[in-house]
């Protein structure tokens, strides 16, 4: 009976249902199956690519998957310099960029390759708001920088996708990362090289006074702090005769005459050490010198933040003329019994390495201060060329004391005899003692209701200061 059923074969017209028998036609089945799948997929709603995906594809003119990604990272304090470098790059003719934000959970933990791949499959990321952060770029000035954003860059015929993000590395230290995706890896490399160069050329640190701090409580960029350039008049720095002149010559004179020195085949890099007891004016003197070199970028590192010596020296080299101030260098050698132990101190060793490693044609002054020259002397003078000038800043002699009294006792009513008496009774005190003496005498007069401070107030202030000095002495 012909009901469409033949021996073992069910063949409703146009149907795929076949029962495999000896006369099963595999090729025919495959053809019909493909046609069936095509018909089904046409009926299913098409998955819409994300807006981010579409933007990437239309910018690149192709699918982004599989394109190389190159990364460069900078310490977090370089964030404004990376931003100004990007701005300067895009300012050049023939270059434009669209800036996009990205939304999506944990995006900060994903690199550019991850983000791009995810737009193709599970659409974890979408176009969102750009993240910005305000960072200090001078004492009272902030700058807005992108902290997470995607730039679709057009540079002549090249199409680049650049992700700028600030994030913690596995080490925990904050980094600014620039990731570049583009068809040609050489284009990406050239882009990153250009940004590095522009970051130096346009550095917001140039000509500023900066310090590295090992704590992060104050305002600043990571460990970096901005300071106003100190202004200390030459007349306010009382040093033994000739000391200040020699300092000016080495620190400022070298920069002024750099062309001549270089054409005569001499090096520019120099090392200056100020040493002497506490309160004699080492810091005071270097503040004056910093003011005398207004174009110099100043990087200050103390014994407590010695781990930043490398960063400070790198900045000094790139932003010359520069002064690297290393205050209290003996601290880096503290706790060592024998002076030669300083040589094995890792921070001191690093400092000396950086001093030695700095190119001779770098217009950089290393300005070191110490209370205990004997602890660092061997290490510093061991190699010629490390220290050019060793300046003792001693306790003031009689002449020094009368100059200091004239400076800090300007407002005091004193006769020549008074001055001689005070100078004679202050043998062995530091210069800072006179600043305090002047202040106390004035305060005593003010609190007693006297119009001018005179020798009586000075003698009382002297007694108080001597008493407190001996009280400290007894406690020790
Ligand atoms: N030679 C000086 N001439 C004029 N003022 C001075 C001099 N030395 C010290 N003073 C005054 O004393 C203050 C403290 O001195 P300063 O901090 O420079 O001493 P220092 O030698 O650096 O001491 P330390 O070894 O403890 O660091 C200065 O700010 C300044 O007011
Ligand atoms: Mg000091």
Image: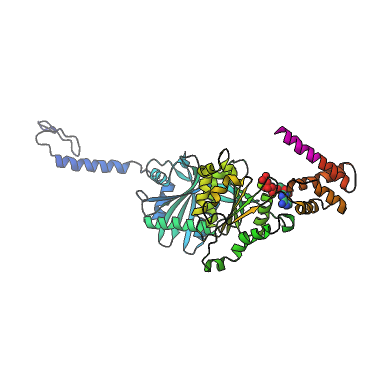
Residue 475 is inside the magenta segment: yes
Is residue 350 at all visible to an observer of this figure?
yes
* 136 within the magenta span: no
Q: Give the extent of the magenta segment.
A: 464-476
Relative to 66, 293 lies left or right: right
**Relative to the observer, which residue lies in front, 147 or 466?**
466
For the C terminus, the quadrant is: top right
Front residue (pair 467, 45)? 467
The structure residue drawn at horizontal position 18% and vertical position 41%, both measured from the top left corner, is 30
From the viewer's perspective, tell me whether residue 92 is left or right of residue 273.
left
* Lateral position of residue 176 relative to residue 293, left or right: left
Is residue 82 at all visible to an observer of this figure? no
Quadrant (top left/top right/bottom left/bottom right) for the N terminus: top left
Can you give x and y, in whole percent of width and height, for residue 126 in the image?
45, 44
Rendered location of residue 206, percent (x, y): 58, 57
The location of residue 332, given as percent across then percent down, is 57, 43
User: In front: 160, or 41?
Assistant: 160
What residue is at 60 percent from the left and 56 percent from the top? 389
Q: Main secondary structure of the magenta part?
A: helix
What's the image's color scheme?
rainbow
- The residue at the point 44 percent across, 55 percent down is 192
Q: Give the image quarter of residue 342.
A: top right
Q: Does residue 13 lie above or below 195 as drawn?
A: above
- Residue 325 horizontal/vertical position (percent): 60, 51
């Amino acid at each position: 009976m012909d009901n469409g059923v033949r021996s073992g074969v069910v063949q409703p017209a146009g149907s795929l249902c076949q029962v495999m028998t000896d006369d099963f036609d595999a090729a025919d089945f495959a053809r019909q199956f493909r046609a069936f799948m095509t018909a089904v997929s046409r009926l299913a709603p098409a998955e819409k690519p994300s807006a981010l995906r579409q933007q990437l594809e239309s910018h690149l003119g192709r699918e982004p998957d599989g394109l190389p990604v190159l990364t460069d990272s900078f310490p977090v304090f370089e964030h404004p310099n990376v931003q100004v470098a990007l701005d300067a790059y895009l300012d050049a003719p023939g270059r434009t960029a669209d800036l996009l934000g990205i939304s999506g959970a944990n995006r900060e933990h994903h690199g550019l390759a991850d983000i791009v791949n995810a737009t193709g499959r599970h659409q974890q990321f979408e176009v969102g708001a750009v993240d910005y952060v305000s960072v200090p770029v001078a004492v009272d000035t902030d700058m807005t920088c992108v902290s997470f954003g995607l730039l679709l860059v057009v540079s002549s015929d090249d199409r680049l996708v650049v992700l700028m993000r600030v994030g913690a590395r596995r080490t925990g230290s904050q980094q600014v990362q620039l990731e570049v995706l583009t068809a040609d890896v050489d284009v990406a490399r050239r882009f990153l090289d250009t940004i590095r160069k522009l970051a130096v050329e346009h550095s917001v640190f140039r000509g500023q006074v900066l310090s590295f701090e090992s704590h992060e409580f104050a305002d600043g960029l990571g460990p970096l702090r901005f300071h106003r350039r100190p202004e200390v008049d030459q007349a306010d720095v009382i040093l033994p005769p000739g000391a200040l002149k020699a300092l000016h010559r080495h620190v400022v004179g070298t920069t002024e005459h750099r062309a001549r020195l270089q054409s005569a085949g001499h090096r520019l890099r120099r090392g200056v050490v100020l040493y002497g007891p506490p309160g004699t004016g080492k810091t005071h003197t270097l503040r004056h010198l910093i003011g005398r070199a207004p174009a110099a970028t100043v990087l200050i590192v103390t014994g407590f933040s010695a781990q930043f010596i490398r960063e400070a020296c790198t900045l000094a080299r790139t932003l010359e003329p520069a002064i690297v101030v290393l205050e209290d260098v003996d601290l880096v050698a503290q706790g060592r019994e024998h002076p030669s132990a300083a040589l094995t101190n890792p921070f001191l060793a690093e400092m000396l390495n950086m001093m030695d490693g700095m190119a001779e044609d770098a217009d950089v002054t290393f300005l070191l201060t110490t209370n205990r020259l004997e602890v660092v002397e061997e290490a510093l003078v061991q190699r010629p060329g490390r220290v050019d000038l060793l300046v003792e800043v001693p306790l003031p002699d009689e002449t020094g004391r009368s100059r200091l009294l004239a400076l800090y006792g300007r407002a005091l009513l004193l006769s020549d005899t008074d001055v001689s008496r005070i100078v004679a009774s202050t043998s062995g005190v530091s210069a800072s003692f006179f600043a305090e003496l002047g202040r106390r005498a004035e305060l005593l007069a003010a609190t007693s209701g006297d119009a001018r401070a005179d020798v009586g107030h000075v003698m009382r202030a002297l007694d108080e200061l001597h008493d407190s000095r001996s009280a400290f002495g007894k406690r020790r």
